């Protein structure tokens, strides 16, 4: 290592010769350029793509509903869900003709998840089976099939019965979920939705005694496991609940995507919204 006395006298004296001055100016310009570039990257978020992103809102009751997706810093989706403003629970239709259905687009940041969109239904008098689900409630269908395919689930389709009865292989259906006993799947199928499945181990599902507040249903159509459906009553939402539970999963997956492992409901005190979440999204490879 050289001491200052070993260096050229022009540097030790702190003066720049004509040859050194341009070099210092060039170095200064490079520092300014590099600083500006770093500032630009910081302003754009750099490699941090994390955050919460929203789909377009639609009117619901006296308020609105919108979807959302959360990404981590690497741009991987971690949860998707629906937010309802507090006023969305008021001013809802009291008749089912026509039924209130919203097709809610997910934000682009949900790309890579299993879900294409969310179909939100308001049921002012509940729906079948009425001994279980006669309470006014919302259905949140997190659909894995696109809207056109969902629309084509129609009894006018000559293959409607065959598609309804065409269940996925058992390994692709969430553990313990079955077609409710009684009528065949094709009879129970709902146009625009498909065949609904219930958890066969849920001992609370007893007609006449079941206290319906919230439940998770799953669904199939034509050999595909294709929706997760939280059903939640209006009255229970009004209590501003906070709950989270794990959801039952298939052993295998038909499509490579991020799938949820948890389901949660809470009231966001900051935004004054009811939040329905499918979270802890985890990548699963088709197998």
Image (cartoon, grey):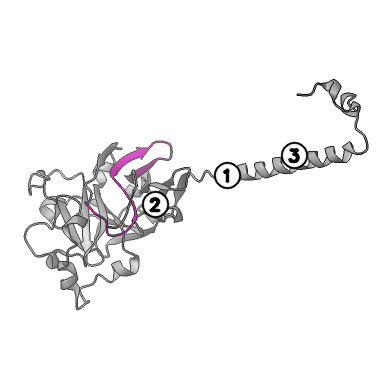
Which badge, 2 or 1, comes first in the chain's sequence?
Answer: 1
Q: Earlier in the sequence, mark 3 or mark 2?
A: 3
Q: Is residue 181 visible?
A: yes
| Image quadrant assignment for residue 11 | top right
Q: Is residue 232 rendered to the left or right of residue 44?
A: left
Q: Picture coordinates of residue 68 (x, y %)? A: 41, 49
Compared across the picture, whether 241 is left or right of 169 comes to right
Q: Give the crowd class for mark 2: few <14, some 14-19, many >=20 residues within 10 Å.
A: many
Q: Is residue 51 above or below residue 3?
A: below
Q: In the rendering, at what x and y percent does residue 124 appear?
A: 23, 54
* Crowd band around label 3 with a 10 angstrom C-alpha radius: few (<14), some (14–19), many (20+): few
For image coordinates 21% across by 65% down, the residue present is 223
Circle number at residue 46: 1
Q: In front of the other: label 3 or label 2?
A: 3
Q: Pick whichever, 5 or 122, lies toward us.
A: 5
Identify which residue, 88 or 141, lies in the foreground: 141
In terms of secondary structure, where does tag 2 sit? strand
Residue sitting nearer the eye, 85 or 163: 163
At x 16%, y 57%, the residue is 170
Percent x, y of residue 106: 40, 56
Magenta span includes 62: no
Give yes or no for residue 266 being in the magenta stretch: yes
Marker disc for residue 67:
2
In which image quadrant can residue 191 be found?
bottom left
Q: Nearer the viewer, mark 2 or mark 1?
A: 1
| Residue that label 3 marks | 31
Region rendered in magenta: 251-275
The local crowd at label 1, few if under 14, some if 14 to 19, many if 20 or more residues have their Cα within 10 Å, is few
Is residue 127 among the parts visible in the rendering? no
- Report x, y in % for residue 62: 37, 51
Q: Residue at x 88, y 26 (%)?
A: 14
Q: CA distance from mark 1 to mark 3?
A: 19 Å
């Amino acid at each position: 290592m050289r001491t200052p006395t070993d260096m050229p006298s022009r540097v030790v004296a702190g003066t720049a010769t004509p040859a050194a001055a341009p070099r210092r100016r060039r170095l200064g310009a490079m520092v300014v350029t590099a600083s500006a570039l770093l500032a630009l990257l910081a302003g754009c978020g750099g490699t941090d793509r994390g955050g919460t992103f929203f789909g377009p809102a639609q009117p619901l009751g006296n308020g609105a509903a919108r979807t959302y997706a959360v990404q981590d810093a690497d741009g991987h989706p971690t949860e998707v869900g629906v937010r309802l403003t507090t006023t969305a629970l008021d001013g809802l239709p009291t008749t089912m003709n026509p039924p209130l259905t919203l097709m809610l687009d997910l934000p682009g940041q949900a790309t890579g998840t299993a879900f294409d969109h969310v179909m939100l239904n308001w049921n002012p008098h509940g729906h079948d089976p009425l001994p279980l689900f006669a309470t006014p409630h919302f259905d949140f269908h997190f659909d894995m099939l696109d809207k056109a395919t969902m629309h084509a689930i129609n009894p006018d389709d000559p293959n409607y019965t065959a598609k309804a009865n065409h269940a996925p292989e058992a390994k692709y259906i969430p553990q313990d979920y079955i077609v409710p006993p009684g009528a065949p799947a094709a009879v129970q199928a709902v146009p625009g939705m498909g065949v609904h499945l219930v958890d066969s181990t849920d001992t609370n599902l007893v007609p006449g005694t079941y206290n319906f507040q919230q439940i998770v249903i799953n669904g199939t159509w034509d050999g595909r496991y294709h929706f997760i459906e939280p059903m939640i009553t209006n009255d229970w939402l009004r209590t501003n609940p906070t709950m989270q539970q794990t959801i039952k999963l298939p052993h295998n997956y038909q499509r490579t995507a991020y799938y949820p492992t948890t389901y949660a409901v809470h009231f966001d005190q900051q935004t004054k919204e009811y939040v329905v979440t499918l979270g802890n999204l985890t990548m699963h490879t088709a197998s």
